[in-house]
Image (cartoon, coloured by chain):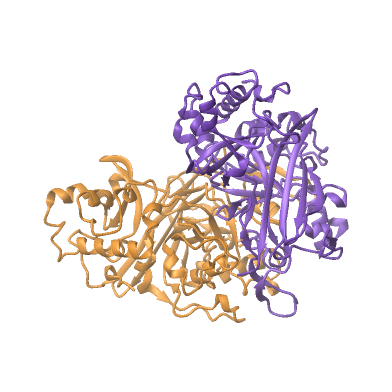
Chain colours: A orange, B purple
């Protein structure tokens, strides 16, 4: 297996990386950007406050030893680059770390080239990084499933009988996954305010966020074949932050018996940078003991959870942000390896660019709950904003921002943020 | 609105159309094919036992008055052609009817050209016609929902409270939609044979088909906008047969609370020809009276149901077919216009190439039930095959075939068939 040399904690870059930046040389996440120099979308890599233009870098000959073509980097999405597979993208990230390293003069010494390949992030527009073929949402945080079960069923039987045997998941809508910063309108739909009366139609009254992370896959196996928990890492390119907007009142009325539909598919926001699974390796941690014992195809070896700090803030219109949740991705009962093994155990074919979200990530403390449904406990415990207003759910004009980073021994590998502002119903 | 001249019942073609062919000049369905003359995939149109090669026809100059390019017809999928929208594809179908009409000499008189553009269907390979962005499955046959409710809940409350208010639907897996004739392996998964014991892993024991039809969409509106029932026809390109394979034992254990997942996403088969909604216009019929009254956004005007005869046959390995169901697409409670209006009422963005299936189409008679679950009533009423064997569900080596056609006043507009053979679990 090729070494992940880009993870070397002793590396430093000749590009200035501000303190507490999410994007040191040990991260090098991939995204799609455009800017004043070209409205064509290209693959970029974040370093400090800047973006390295991989298309220009390729054109200038810095990547010619690698198995890529120019069209992989001047592209609408990361998919073409990802189609080369894990060894190729690892080799690419290692090469970028080499070029950006203080000790390396190749690019550093050529000021003309540096000017052509580096741009300030604030001067660039970020785009949806991946063309999502199929989107799956899991439900893999025990505390979240327990909280929902308590509220809608019974605290003594909060988890349904299948929950500890199956990484429960369902298919979601790919077309409405949009990039951070895309404003959207409050959805309209059917709800049933009074169960003895007919349903009514109108704007959703219980709009909620869900704090999630998603992983993006390489091309999987053919229809009929499965990916084991041991193989799963080779099929995961990287991760991003994911806000799975939910219309709780629409969901409650529609979801029986086939699951959530219009309550979820009006918009989901992702952060622009895909942090590679390689960059997250140093932050691996153990997961919970799984009791009852899982079936053999869900067993796994080693540390497959990841310690990633997460937070959510609400910024009311023309006001300042209040952080309403601090959670961690390590609070998952089921890890990505188990999710991917389960998803494909029936022969379902995983494709390059599929996106799989974690489900709401709630920790055990109330301050770590990952949705307003849980934070306000169905609206019974309003949350105080810094501007004096209260929130049970999300209001028009609010901006919801999620952030995430892993940190260990002085190295911080972050995700940036995903944010979105809610416009009134059309 | 441009007239649909291809529907003229008085048209006949200079190409021989065998009696009872699904593909007279009044049909002209679109598909993707390749053959000995070129392994490149092209758009073809079925006429009798032959396929008209639209790419060759374009190259020879017969379509130059129309708003298409060669790349729309030499294409992996119909999507590029469909991106031109309804008026363009209607104009194209009208032009093809003109060229194929007995009275027209343009193509007919040029034997060289005829040889270049016409191929026997039996010499061609058909491919998945559409690149499916998102796939949605509805649940819109009342008899099917009632039957399932009776078996799994209670005959007195078989329909859930939301069923007559909402065209219930859920998101499915797009990547595992495959073309008729693609063999597939019996899926494996978790089931719980005894609810007091832990779940077990192994091949599905209750493999079932679901007799469905699907419609394919043109590019819809932007995220946040909705398509009304009155506008829906303009966003529907056409229809095909759809076999929504279901693993009943996996489904029963996994589906609460977020809906079916691995029980459905191992394979779904579609028929190769997309019959345009235009070609189906003469077969429109009225739907059921909807009581209770639906919400205004689900109201519709005119006849929006379609009279399409459907049948399902099972062919055991090395044996002959037994027809096990005869149903009709008109047995839908919710029509496509209502489904599309509901799907987008929250602002969900519909894309070119989305596929939306009807849900199992069961009529009121037992002989019209559209799944083995209903036909064998959970396995309590085995079905006799012609070879003497019995079926409760589908066995390894069985081929399941679905067929459909509309017929009126001597004109038959058919779908051909969708079939698939089940291989043993891997």
Q: Is residue A306 above or below residue A318?
A: below
Of A321 and B361, which appears nearest the observer?
A: B361
Quarter in which the C terminus of chain B is drawn: bottom right
- Residue A93: x and y in percent read 29, 62
Residue at 58% from the left image edge and 40% from the top image edge: B31
Of B166 and A238, which appears nearest the observer?
A: A238
Residue A405 occupies quadrant: bottom left
Residue at 64% from the left image edge and 66% from the top image edge: B187
Residue A234 appears anywhere in the view: yes
Q: In this view, does A130 lie above or below B261?
A: above
In the figure, is residue B293 to the left or right of B219?
Answer: right
- How many marks overall? 0
In the figure, is residue B201 to the left or right of A416?
Answer: right
Of B268 and B312, which appears nearest the observer?
A: B312
- Residue A366: x and y in percent read 54, 68
Quarter in which the N terminus of chain B is drawn: top right
- Residue A155: x and y in percent read 68, 72
- Residue B92: x and y in percent read 56, 27
List the single residue furthest toward the front.
Answer: B111
Residue A167 occupies quadrant: bottom right
Residue A262 appears anywhere in the view: no
């Amino acid at each position: 297996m090729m070494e992940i040399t880009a993870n070397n904690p002793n590396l430093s870059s000749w590009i200035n990386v501000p303190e507490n930046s999410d994007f040191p040389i040990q991260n090098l996440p991939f995204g799609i950007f455009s800017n004043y120099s070209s409205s064509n979308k290209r693959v970029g890599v974040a370093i400090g406050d800047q973006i390295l233009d991989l298309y220009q870098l390729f054109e200038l000959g810095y990547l010619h030893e690698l198995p890529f073509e120019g069209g992989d980097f001047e592209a609408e999405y990361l998919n073409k680059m990802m189609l080369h597979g894990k060894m190729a993208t690892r080799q690419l990230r290692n090469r970028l770390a080499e070029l950006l390293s203080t000790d390396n003069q190749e690019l550093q010494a050529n000021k003309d080239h540096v000017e052509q390949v580096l741009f300030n992030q604030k001067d660039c527009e970020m785009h949806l990084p991946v063309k999502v073929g199929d989107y799956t949402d899991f439900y893999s945080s025990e505390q979240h499933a327990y909280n929902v079960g308590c509220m809608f069923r019974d605290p003594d039987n909060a988890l349904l009988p299948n929950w500890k045997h199956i990484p429960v998941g369902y298919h979601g809508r790919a077309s409405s996954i949009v990039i951070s910063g895309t404003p959207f309108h409050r959805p309209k739909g059917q709800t049933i305010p009074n169960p003895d009366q007919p349903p009514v139609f109108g704007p959703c009254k219980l709009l909620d966020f869900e704090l999630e992370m998603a992983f993006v896959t390489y091309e999987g196996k053919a229809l009929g074949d499965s990916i084991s928990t041991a193989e799963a890492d080779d099929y995961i390119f990287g991760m991003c932050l994911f806000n799975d907007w939910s219309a709780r009142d629409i969901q409650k009325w529609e979801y029986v018996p086939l699951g959530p539909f219009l309550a979820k598919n009006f918009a989901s926001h992702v952060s622009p940078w895909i942090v590679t699974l390689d960059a997250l390796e140093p932050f691996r941690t153990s997961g919970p003991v799984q009791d009852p014992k899982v079936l053999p195809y869900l067993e796994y070896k080693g540390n497959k959870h990841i310690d990633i700090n997460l937070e959510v803030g609400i910024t009311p219109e023309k006001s300042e942000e209040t952080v309403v949740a601090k959670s961690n991705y390590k609070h998952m009962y089921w890890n990505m390896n188990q999710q991917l093994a389960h998803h494909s155990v029936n022969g379902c074919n995983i494709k390059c660019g599929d996106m799989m979200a974690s489900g709401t990530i709630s920790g055990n403390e109330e301050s770590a709950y990952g949705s307003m449904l849980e934070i306000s406990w169905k609206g019974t415990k309003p949350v105080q904003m810094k501007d004096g207003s209260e929130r049970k759910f999300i209001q028009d004009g609010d901006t919801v921002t999620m952030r995430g980073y892993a940190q260990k021994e002085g190295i911080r590998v972050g995700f940036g943020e995903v944010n979105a502002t809610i416009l009134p119903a059309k």
